[in-house]
Amino acid sequence: MPISLTGKRWLVQERDDRVVRELSEALSIEPAVAGVLFLRGIRIKEQGDIFLEPSLKHLSNPTKIPGIIPAADRICDAIRNKEKICIYGDYDVDGVTATSLMFLLLERFGADVFYFIPNRMEHGYGLHAEAIREIRKAGTDLLVTVDNGISANDEVALARALGMEVIITDHHEPPVELPETKYIINPKVSGRSTIDDSSSRLSDSSSNLSSSLEGDFTILAGVGLAFALIVAVRARLRPSAGSPSAGSPSAGSPSTGSPSTGSPSTGSPSTGSGYHVSERELPNLSEYLDLVAIGTIGDVAPLTGENRILVRHGLEKIARSKNKGIRALMRVSGLNGSMVTPGQVGFVLAPRINAAGRIGDAGTALRLLVSSDEREVEAAALILNQENQKRQEIEKEILGQVLERIEKEGRDDKVIVAHAEDWHAGVIGIVASRIVERFYRPTILITMKNGIGTGSGRSIPGFSLYEALHACREELLGFGGHRLAAGLTIDWDRIQRFRERINRYAEDHLNAEDLIPTIKVDGIIDTHHISDGLLQDLEKLKPFGMGNPEPIFVSRNVRIRNLRLVGEEHLRFQIQSRQGPMTVIGFRMKELLNSLSEDTPLDLLYHLRYNEYNGTRSIQAVLVDLMPSQNS
């Protein structure tokens, strides 16, 4: 397979031309866009309609998530009996938005509720024994976790021994042995329960969507799972006390007033909590989708299925958010306009919320999102902005040190392992990602915390970091994570042995081709077929993100014209399209200038976008990669 000028391989993904043609005709879209839909798993018109026009009524019934009904009923009982509820969150953007969402809405429901966010340095991730004791001392009766808890067997046992009941909502991979509580909401558990509760058994009634269109709740971020629970709670608080259903104002379509038709039922109206709130007093849940969108994008959850619907509508809410904290954060971030993109959430808003948990106190981010005091949210937004700047400075410093070591020690290792006693534990994971991007090698960075090595790793698609750590477990004190990201603890004096051992493992599991980046291509396009109609259809595929990346197309044997540099770093040239000369811009690709010639045909990889300049809209290709034409 040929290698591009940037050292990458291209993989043109296979499609079924017959299905693509049928989708194009049925949905009245360009064949190139139908091909992208095929690669996103769309096979029939009904799926395509939902993907292209995702409505809140298309959300699946959240009561299909095992355990959600008894948990919702338990929360309703706590509200009715005026029991004290504590929301135990996490310090990342997913955990912070999930905690904010749960706190704000339970408060609106009339609950006696407060929240607790652990400090990364003091408590670490998840439930912490001493924090649980303090929470119980505060008079807590019901502890509800968001974005954590599924592996906290000992801590859940402690909470229950102290007299609290525990509801776990967590989207992370569950262990073989689950915590001992009957209130577990984790779609990946697949209905397992540690304490039998017949009320968790759901009806087999068919949905108004075919089984092929039913939602995959396992892709929900922590905030999405919290939202699903809130939907179920709201439905149980309605005077009808029936279960939520797709298309109802209390569930799949929080903002609509349309009645439910043909949706599943999990019981008669008498199965509710016995405590109801008048319909006019119940909040419109769609107004809180801004928090859901920020947490989902920030957690890099797939923007498909349920997430695509939630994020599509949540992005619309962010720009005109009623949340004073979100508006303040947008102001200090320099964001304005009628629409916010996933990129702006992922690279502007989310890092500022994350910064508090990484190097400061995540409580600042919580106060930003739950406070109604203008001065408090403005102050919190400024602090988060400053902490993000500080995080960037720390990241830059550590990155420089790691690059210097790699340059000094060489690049022979297939797995990069570097360590220093003074690196910030909250930042090394980000730096590891930067190293992977630059060298396309699995990377583990280790710092010292309380005399113990604490590491964070990132990997590449062909190498499971979790399995690698498992193979080296005798060198470690502990580890956890998944294929592409993991954490570990290790005795400081065993780091060199660990480095050698994981590289021996890599020698057996990584070959030379695995270490060459591969770009997946969504389709082949003749540049003369690029038109305004194609761009309009591509716009319907938004929002782009994990699971639904912006399409990449290849055009073969293309002649370029007017090649030059723009600014100090960017390539620019023109190619011919159906509508005449089209600009191609290659951001930060100046090093390729001397490798190109207007006399040599090229194969181009690119995104297609609209470019707005001085009130004029034109089609522009954003260069991803290029190589000398293989067909010339």
Image (tube, grey):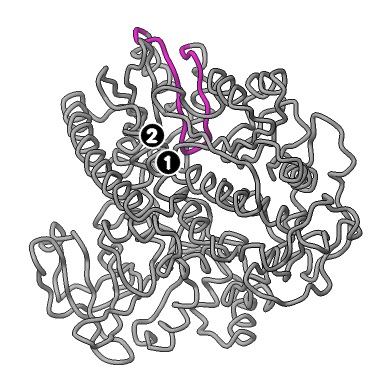
Extreme-top residue of the structure: 493
Residue at image location 66% in from the left, 53% down from the top: 109
For the residues bearing labels 1 and 2, Cβ distance under 8 angstroms: yes
Is 12 rendered above or below residue 376? below
Helix or strand or loop: what does disc 1 sit on? loop
Q: Quadrant of residue 355?
A: top left
Residue at image location 38% in from the left, 88% down from the top: 532
Q: Which residue is mark 2?
A: 442
Q: Which mark is residue 460?
A: 1
Estimate the x, y position of residue 233 in percent, counting from the top left: 72, 52
Relative side of 406 to 174, left or right: left
For marks 1 and 2, the one nearer the N-term is: 2
Q: Quadrant of residue 596?
A: bottom left
Residue 153 visible in the displayed image: yes
Residue interval drawn in magenta: 475-493
Q: Dot 2, how many residues are within 10 Å of its Cα: few (below 14), some (14-19), or many (20+)? A: many
Residue 190 visible in the displayed image: no
Estimate the x, y position of residue 457 in percent, counting from the top left: 40, 31
Residue at image location 49% in from the left, 46% down from the top: 94
Is 184 rendered above or below residue 268? above
- If the image is split into quadrants, where does the N terminus sit? bottom left
Q: Dot 1, how many residues are within 10 Å of its Cα: few (below 14), some (14-19), or many (20+)? A: many
| Cα–Cα gap, marks 1 and 2 | 6 Å
Estimate the x, y position of residue 449 in percent, counting from the top left: 35, 17
Identify residue type, mark 1. Ile
Helix or strand or loop: what does disc 2 sit on? loop
Extreme-bottom residue of the structure: 579
Q: Which mark is residue 517?
A: none
Estimate the x, y position of residue 61 in percent, counting from the top left: 74, 60
- If the image is split into quadrants, where does the C terminus sit? bottom left
